[in-house]
Amino acid sequence: MFDLSFNTTQQSTLFDTTDRWDLLIIGGGPAGLNAALYAQRKGLKVGLIAKDIGGQLHNTTDVDNYLGFQRLEGKTLSNQFLNHVKALDVPIKSDVFVTQITPQKALFSLQLSNGKTLFSKTIIIATGSKPRKLNIPGEETFSNRGVSYCTTCDAPFFKDKHVIVSGGGNSAAEAVLDLSYWAKHITVVHRSRWRADKLLLDKISNLPNVTIHLETQIINVDGDEMMRGVHVLDKNTQSTRFIHAEGLFIEIGTIPMSDLVTGFVQLNANHEIVVDAMQMSSIPGLFAAGDVSHQPFKQIIIAAAEGAKAALAVTQYINQKTKESY
Amino acid sequence: MAKLFNDDVRTQITEILAQTKNPIQLVLFTKEGVCPTCQETQQLLEEVCETNEKLTLSVKSIETDKALADTYGVTMTPSFVILDSKGVYKGVKFNGIPAGHEINSLISALLEMSGLTIHYQEQVLNRINSIEKPINIKVFVTLSCPHCAGAVQNAHRLAMLNPNIEAEMIEAQTFQELSTKHNVSGVPKIVINDQHELVGNQPIEAFLEKIERI
């Protein structure tokens, strides 16, 4: 009933007394938190800067594929991650965000939104990703007038209504399951085939109020004051038709939040940060972990594991540099 | 009656609220008869106040204490305001129960109303101070929304920092009529002076840009 994630304490942290760090981690999702845990245990002077602790875990109702935890709520897992990190007294700064990173000779400088500058030998970018949009006419106009990107937030508004879920991955399948408690009917519209886990699809096939249109593309969102429905193209028959619906939940994946390093770090075509086996980017000393890195599978356990890898690699990198007289 | 807070949550809230600086008062308005969540809201606030002696709760009736309700602009139930250490209403109001993720915006409002410093850049503080028009900010939320408490927190901070600004959380499911009136189908939805809209958990600068254009 209570989702306590209060993180603003007046206790001073290392952020108040120093501007020189071994490692600064940007991002508070599973990758960033696990990197902080590993780096702190290694004895690095590490700090974590994150506006949103928990990251996308907060948008997930149930997590059922994190080894060791069965049927855990996303926010519960995120709170457990945070409590673990806090128990090790990792300094966390959540009232600012990083506006710019500049590689200097032996250090990186980080400009903060409060005007301050921090310096660090290494950086781990764990900024994650944000919901991908369909980029079709009407999507923006009816955003929050029927179009939603957060099922856990907005499902209650669609009690006894007809809603469409766009997407074919696990997030879309989970949205269908979440919405099934509220909506009268759910229509899934996806441009290709299902990519979701069989376990989730089996659950959906048991629901009485779900219709599925695969190989079908949403062309636009229509309505007046509020959304009334979507025009779709059946890719097999090349015919278009209108589906009446009061809501459209868009769950078609995410786009990486790599803006901070765009221009000086190598990104792939999807704007993900290209990293090597040590999670290091094209800039020595700058590492990336989690959904923002170019690894193909966006999973909590993979993000957390990449965070651990990055922190260990940072430790090795700093030791090496020290030997070469930092 | 069964407690709303389990031991774990109560311990955490007690620890956080130990930072409460000056004594402050919460004034809750309820109604006899049909009032969804009135009882739960009262119980929640009682349990919160039990964790720290600097917090006191006063429960009023929107009917028999109408004059007082009018003073705070309270028109719905359950609704409560948080007064500062001098008993002054600074425009911080909650309509509906702040359970779920909203427990965080409640704790934040209590601590900051008690005198904890609100850390904004000087430039932002100057912009907030220069707002001279009367501003009302409604933040519509659902209790399952992880991004909403941040929006409520920003709105309440604006109210605390400028006497011309009033900010209220509105729990959308309890106040469906008002939510429908403002076409709320996604949260957080921020409505300024009943006509200017912002969607999502916006940074304080986005609130200011919108307000400055009114």
Image (spheres, coloured by chain):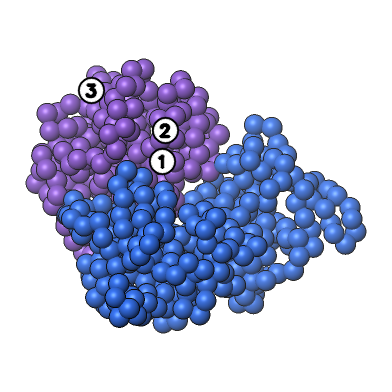
Same chain, labels 2 and 3: yes
Q: Which mark is residue B207?
A: 2
Label annotation for residue B203:
1
In-front residue for pair B17/A286:
A286
Specify the subunit that label 3 lies on.
Answer: B
Q: Secondary structure at mark 3?
A: helix
For marks 2 and 3, the one nearer the N-term is 3
Q: Residues within 10 Å of mark 1 (few under 14, many from 20)?
A: few
At 26% from the left and 23% from the top, the residue drawn is B163
Q: Chain of mark 2?
A: B
Q: Is residue B93 visible?
A: no
Crowding at dot 3, Cα within 10 Å, few <14 / some 14-19 / many 20+, comes out as some
Q: Colour of chain B?
A: purple
Vertical arrangement, residue A23 with respect to residue A69, above or below: above
* Mark closer to the chain start, 1 or 3: 3
Q: Amino acid at mark 2?
A: Phe
Determine the CA span between mark 1 and mark 3. 33 Å
Chain appearing in blue on the rendered image:
A
